[in-house]
Amino acid sequence: MAKKSKFYTVWKGRTTGVFDTWAEAEEQIKGFEKAQYKSFDTLKEAEDAFKGNYWQSVQKGQTGGTGTQTKSATLVGKPNPESISVDAACAGNPGKLEYQGVETGTKRVLFSMGPFPQGTVNIGEFLAIVHGLAFLKKHNSDLPIYSDSKTAISWVKNKKVKTNLERNKKNEELFQLLDRGEQWLKDNTYSNKILKWETEFWGENPADYGRK
C-alpha cells in the first residue's frame, strides 16, 4: 500500500480537524476569512498539532505564514499576472451557484454568470474554465487560465463532467450549460494552459468572492 504523502490540520475553517486529502481540507478553508491550516507528513503529527493551535506550529518553524507550504516556494514561483483567474461560489452543497472570471493582475471582472438555484462548486469551476477558454478564443488570446479546483481542471482535460448532482427541473438550466460546455471542448482546440492556483502560497484566487 502506498504511503500517504500528507495530512492536513485545520484549526480555523468551516469544519476543523485533520483531513486525509488537500481537497477535503480546501473545502473547509476556501473563502473562509483568516483560515488557519497546515500540512504534515504523518497522521500523528497532524493530530498532535490539532491538540495545540496554529500559532504553536508557526513558532516551531513548521510553516512560514497563514496556511501551509507543502511544496518548495522556489519551485512553485509566483502567479503570472498576464492571465485570467476563474472561481465559483456556492451557498450550500448543492446550493445557489455563481462563477466569474477576472484579470489576474487587476481583478477586473471579464465575465460573470449566475446565480443558479442549485449547483455545486466543482460544476461552477468547470463552467468557469470553459467560459474562460471560449472567452480567450473569441479574443484570439493565448493567456493562461488559473483555477484552484483540481477536480474541475481534470473534468476539462477529460472533456467530461462527473458530478453526483442529479438533474432535475430546478437545475435544468445549469445542466444545459454543462452539456454545452462538454460539447464546446469536443468541438474546439485551444493553446491556453490551464494552471492550478497555488492557494497555499499565493492566498485566495483573484476571482474569489470573499465569502465565508
Image: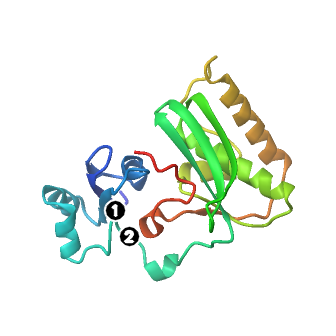
What residue sits right under mark 2 in the picture?
Answer: 70
Residue 123's place in the image compared with 104, above or below, is: above
Other residues around mark 2 within 10 Å, as few (<14) / some (14–19) / many (≥20): some
Residue 109, located in which quarter of the rendered image?
bottom right
Q: Residue furthest top?
A: 169
Judge whether residue 75 can be spotted in this image.
yes
In the picture, the quarter occupied by the C terminus is: top left
**For marks 1 and 2 on the same chain, the one whose residue lies earlier in the sequence:** 1
Q: Which percent across, then down, holds residue 40?
A: 28, 65
Q: Which structural element holds mark 2? A: loop
Mark 1 neighbour density, 10 Å: few (under 14) some (14–19) many (20 or more): some
Question: Visible in this render: residue 163?
Answer: no
Task: Give the Cα distance between marks 1 and 2.
Answer: 8 Å
- Which residue is rendered at x = 65% and y = 53% of the image? 101
Query: Which image quarter holds the N terminus?
Result: bottom left
* Label 1 sits on residue: 6
